[in-house]
Image (cartoon, grey):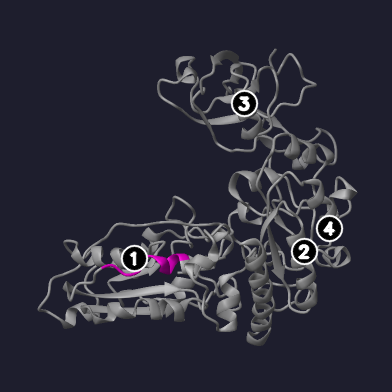
Amino acid sequence: MTAAENLNEQIFPAPIKSVEEGSPAARAGVRPGDVLLRVNGVAVTDVLAYRRELERGVVSLEVARPRAALQVMTGVQGTAQDHHRLLMPAAPDLTDTFTFSVEWEDPGLDFEEVLFDGIKKCANKCDFCYVHQMPRGFRKSLYIMDDDYRLSFLYGSFVTLTNLTEGDINRILDENLSPLYVSVHTANQDLRQDMMKWWRLKVKDPQAVQIREMIERLESIDLYTQIVLVPGRNDRENLDETVEYLSSRPNVISAAVVPIGLTGHRTNLPDVRTFNKEEAQDTLKRLNVWRRKFLAERGTRFVFPSDELYLLAGEPLPSEEEYEGFPMLENGVGMIRDFLTEGLPELPAALPQPMRVVLGTGLLFADSLERAIAPMRDIQGLDIEVRAVENKTFGRVTTVAGLLTGRCFRHAVKPGEADLLIVPPTTLRYGTELMLDDVSLTELRNEFRMDVRAGGATLGELARVILDNARSSGPQFGMSAHAVKDTAVKDKGEQEQIAEASIHGHGQA
């Protein structure tokens, strides 16, 4: 049965990104650019459903090879729309299909996306939604209000559960999609509705917005939860109530507490603010009471404040042990401690040639980074500066390093003022040299007339990036003013890049 033979069936063509050499798919003639239509005669919605079918052992896969689509004219000729008619490409022709089978063997397919039927959208209009605070001009994917439980299971992204259908809930339970990462914010139902303001027309199941009922219905699923705190709303006694409830549920593994993140782009949005020092201190004091109680009674601290709370409060970070394995690192819980865990390597007494280095970071982390790299200032020939970069894209109120963009560095760094600029690895899209505003490190190198590299995920890696650069053969963009002053040493060159990013995460270094 082909797509043309059953027009009433809804299929979700899954474009194939690559085919493993020598695999069953390769032997069957499958090529990148082909699309998967069905597995065992069934249309699959995502990579999870695809894997579930493969577990049956004997599997038949139907693949289509799209043919070039003809262009068609939109609109209706002879009507008021006639002058707006456009020549547009028609939907791809998927009638050219073939089938191959595997028995207890991976077909060898890698797909362009893990969701074949599209991403599930958010049903909420939260007062603190970051997407609503985004400035214009970024790539479209950053404006998608995703709230998809499948991505939560696959990648650890947080979901609110308010858009789930009865079918979604049954699938989570039947397929044991555990763990999930859930944004709770508050266990007080009236307060949660006031803060999240879900769109009733987007809520598929009225029961899905009842957070306590949802947590209890998903009792067989491990849940990592988060509480985004808004001063005067869900903090203080409300926070105590939420922590008490979450800790009473056996399937809730832990709760991260994160202060609201703001940008300078809050036009026509509710008037909210971030925490001041005294409020952050009060929050930590309350949470520490709970943490000591849980550790004594359960052997786990259960609730974990984000790094930002400690920095706002001006209090020291917990030890590595207190993070209990860093289960929610990507949520900003323990990122700085994890960065500091690998200390500085053995440092040379002097560099083979002078080098000036600027370490760019966010306003929040600058002081911590300054203290961490202090021993490197004793290296002869190394002029190193920690530069707190103001966020010119999201506004000064945005102080985390991971949301710095190319525009921010263009405002903060002058061409030729250093030999090497280090940017936080968390500013880059995973696996690329592109920042949030699609400015690349190569562009910055050319504009700044200096080498520009991503720092390491740890303090030790950061130091090695700098020292490897100093040991390389020669400068790429010419010597800085610092290097010119010292003619007794050789020129500098390039180093190995270490790039790491999290699109929704908050960077620390």
Would you name the residue on which mark 2 appears?
126
Image position, residue 505 (x, y; %) = 56, 61
Which amino acid lies under the numbered mark 4 shown in the image of this protein?
Answer: Trp
Compare residues 133 and 61 and report the one nearer the observer. Answer: 61
Image position, residue 27 (x, y; %) = 45, 15
**Residue 395 visible to the viewer:** no
Q: Earlier in the sequence, mark 3 or mark 2?
A: 3
Residue at mark 4 to residue at mark 3: CA–CA distance: 40 Å
| Above-or-below relation of 39 to 485 | above
Residue at mark 2 to residue at mark 4: CA–CA distance: 8 Å
Of helix, strand and loop, which one carries label 3? loop
**Residue 425 visible to the viewer:** yes
Would you name the residue on which mark 1 appears?
460
Q: Earlier in the sequence, mark 4 or mark 3?
A: 3
Residue depth check, mark 4 versus mark 3: number of the one nearer the observer: 4
Compare residues 403 and 158 and report the one nearer the observer. Answer: 158
| Above-or-below relation of 164 to 260 | above
**Quadrant of the image for the N terminus?**
top right
**Segment colored magenta:** 338-345
Residue at mark 1 to residue at mark 2: CA–CA distance: 39 Å
Would you name the residue on which mark 4 appears?
198
The answer to which image quadrant residue 124 occupies is bottom right
The answer to which image quadrant residue 232 occupies is bottom right
Image position, residue 260 (x, y; %) = 68, 71
Residue farthest along the left direction in this orientation: 488
Side (left or right) of 246 relative to 398: right
Residue at mark 1 to residue at mark 3: CA–CA distance: 53 Å
The answer to which image quadrant residue 352 occupies is bottom left
Q: Earlier in the sequence, mark 1 or mark 2?
A: 2
